Image (cartoon, coloured by chain):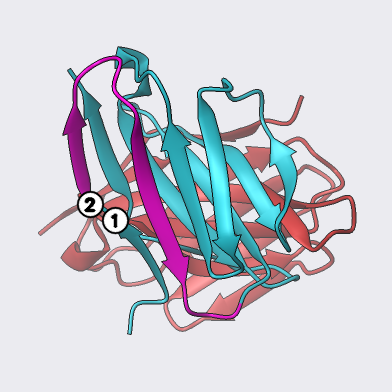
Chain colours: A cyan, B red
């Protein structure tokens, strides 16, 4: 069974559209994260949620909004997509201590 | 600010040992990690080391930590073609005691294994 899953795996869309990426974890973890990996493979954290509370927001534009309907899900909603949003977005989860488990990534292409 | 540095490329022959190096700057790091990313795939946690340890060995993998120099290395013994991937070093810092760990990643080292 997949521990951290994301949908869709690929997303191609036009500039200006609004889209969502979904993430689910079945590990019972308390904290979930979103990371962005750009075309040069640089990884940056965007958000984390712990018990439905936003813990970290690394100067991400407010066009990006994480939404957590429950502890097992952290979705990423993006408004007014821009070309520079094209990247691979990774969801991850952790329980307290150390290991963050990553999803397979969603490759977003904005045309 | 915090920064994690690693060389971008490494090429080794099959059967040789690979050593990937990383330096970090945040002395409050609690854990240091090595992740592997194969082409088109997500990140896979390879191993991690707690900041008060010097060394950790796990089968073909050996992690060495020099906390004084803030230097971390990953040694892969008997490197195989299946080890070809990008390896990310990351430092983890606990955030506000809320159970969240912020990971800062290096830019990744692309390991190419020559048959």
Residue B75 coordinates in the image, percent (x, y): 47, 62
* Residue A95 is covered by the magenta coloring: no
Residue A21 painted magenta: yes
Residue B104 seen in the figure:
no
Please name the residue shown 51% across and 23% down the image: A63
State the image coordinates of residue B54 (x, y, percent, origin top left): 75, 66
Residue A11 lies in quadrant: top left
Mark 2 nearby-residue class (10 Å; few <14, some 14–19, many ≥20): some
A106 over A103 or under it: above or below: above
Residue plotted at (73% across, 60% down): B31
Give the residue displayed 59% in from the left and 25% down from the top.
Answer: A60
> In the image, what residue occupies the spot 33% across and 39% down?
A88
Closer to the camera in the image, A54 or A90: A54
Query: On the picture, is B71 further left or further right than A46?
Result: right
Q: Is residue A54 above or below residue A58?
A: below
Q: Please provide the residue range marked out in magenta.
A: A9-28
Subunit bearing disc 2: A
Task: Mark yes or no: residue B34 visible.
Answer: yes
Check disc 2 and report its element: helix, strand or loop. loop
The spot of residue B90 in percent (x, y) is 60, 49
> Could you say which is closer to the camera, residue B95 or residue B64?
B95
Q: CA distance from mark 2 to mark 1?
A: 5 Å
Q: Which mark is residue A7?
A: 1
| Residues tagged 2 and 1 counted as in contact (Cβ below 8 A) | yes
Nearest the viewer among B62 and A100 is A100
Where on the picture, by quarter, is residue B63?
bottom right
Please tell me whether mark 1 sits on a helix, a strand or a loop.
strand
Residue position for label 2: A9
């Amino acid at each position: 069974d997949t521990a951290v899953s994301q949908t869709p795996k690929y997303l191609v869309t036009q500039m200006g559209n609004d889209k969502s990426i979904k993430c689910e974890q079945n590990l019972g973890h308390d904290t979930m994260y979103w990371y962005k990996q750009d075309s040069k493979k640089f990884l940056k954290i965007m958000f984390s949620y712990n018990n439905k509370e936003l813990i970290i927001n690394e100067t991400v534009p407010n066009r990006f909004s994480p939404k957590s309907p429950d502890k097992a899900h952290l979705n990423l909603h993006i408004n007014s997509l821009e070309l520079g949003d094209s990247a691979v977005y990774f969801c991850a989860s952790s329980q307290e201590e150390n290991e963050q488990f990553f999803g397979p990534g969603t490759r977003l292409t904005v045309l | 600010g915090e920064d994690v540095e690693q060389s971008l490329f490494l090429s080794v022959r099959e059967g040789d040992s690979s050593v990937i190096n990383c330096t970090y700057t945040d002395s409050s790091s609690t854990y240091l990690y090595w992740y592997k990313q194969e082409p088109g795939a997500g990140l896979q946690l390879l191993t991690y080391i707690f900041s008060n340890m010097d060394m950790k060995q796990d089968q073909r993998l050996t992690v060495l930590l020099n906390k004084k120099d803030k230097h971390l290395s990953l040694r892969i013994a008997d490197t195989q073609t299946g080890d070809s991937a990008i390896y990310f070093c990351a430092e983890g810092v606990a955030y506000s005691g809320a159970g969240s760990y912020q990971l800062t990643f290096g830019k990744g080292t692309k390991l190419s294994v020559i048959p």
